Amino acid sequence: MERHVRALASAVKEAEEVSIVLTHGHGDHADAAPALSEMTGARVFGPEGVEGVDVVIGEGDIVPTDAGDLRALHTPGHTSEHLSFLWSGREALFVGDLFLGEGDTTWVAEYTGCVADYLRSLERVRALSPSVLYPTHGPPLQDPGEAVQRFEAHRRRRIEQARQAMAAHPTADIEGLLDAVYGAGLPDALRGAARRSLSALVEFVRDGDMS
């Protein structure tokens, strides 16, 4: 990580002012912020509850930049505090880990109510009609409408699989439902993550699919 931080600091060494903007508190997003801040003198902007943040921001707050303001939007689901940032004048949205640049899924199993939150956040992105999405991992998503549809369709397929498994095995616990939803060939290394994801889906179904 130290090499990466030094490379980032070198890339902005000619800038008059540097700001660090965090979408959420996962280590691959936030852990390097204090070191980079120390090297560059940058203030760290981010959601409440994330370590190392100098300026707490939330829904509607503005982070000014020389390329246009970034307006914070609360888009929970991946984490409860997750923020996206609308780039003023560009119709572009920085979406953190709400989407990934490839595939059709992201991690949604972090906290109670995360699946319902995630679906609402996808609907919010759809309503904004941005021209491009910039996820943290992977390339830009140049067709946001298609991306929203793809990620939502994947999540709803999983919800339906969970619903069908629960109906077919009404007394089964999460462990008993794993194979029905993910298949008997699920590698042992993935069972922990799958169990957490399935638990979130089951909670959503039991709560009446409040999306």
Image: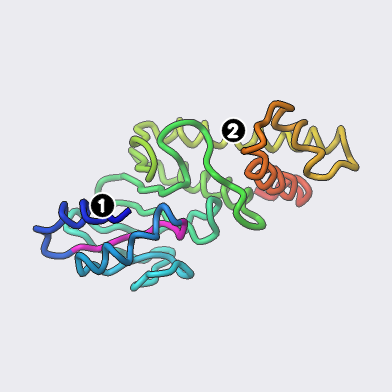
Residue 58 coordinates in the image, percent (x, y): 43, 66
Q: Hey, which quadrant is residue 39 in on the image?
A: bottom left
- The color scheme shown is rainbow
Q: Nearer the viewer, residue 155 or 71?
A: 155
Q: Nearer the viewer, residue 143 or 185?
A: 185
Residue 157 coordinates in the image, percent (x, y): 65, 32
Q: Is residue 21 magenta?
A: yes
Q: Which secondary structure class fits the magenta region best?
A: loop
Question: Mark 1 and 2 residues: CB-CB less than 8 Å, in contact?
Answer: no
Residue 190 located left or right of residue 86: right
Q: Nearer the viewer, residue 170 or 93?
A: 170
Residue range (magenta) = 18-26
**Inter-mark Cα distance, 1 to 2:** 37 Å
**Extreme-left residue of the structure:** 14
Residue beneath the point at 16% across and 58% down? 66
Q: Which mark is residue 193?
A: none
Q: Which residue is mark 2?
A: 154
Q: Secondary structure at mark 1?
A: helix
Q: Secondary structure at mark 2?
A: helix
Identify the mark nearer the N-term, 1 or 2.
1
Amino acid bearing label 2:
His
Q: Which residue is mark 1?
A: 3
Amino acid bearing label 1:
Arg
Residue 156 coordinates in the image, percent (x, y): 64, 36
Disc 1 versus disc 2: nearer the observer = 1
Residue 78 located left or right of residue 32: right
Q: Hey, which quadrant is residue 30 in on the image?
A: bottom left
Residue beneath the point at 67% across and 36% down? 188
Residue beneath the point at 69% across and 38% down? 159
Residue 83 located left or right of residue 19: right
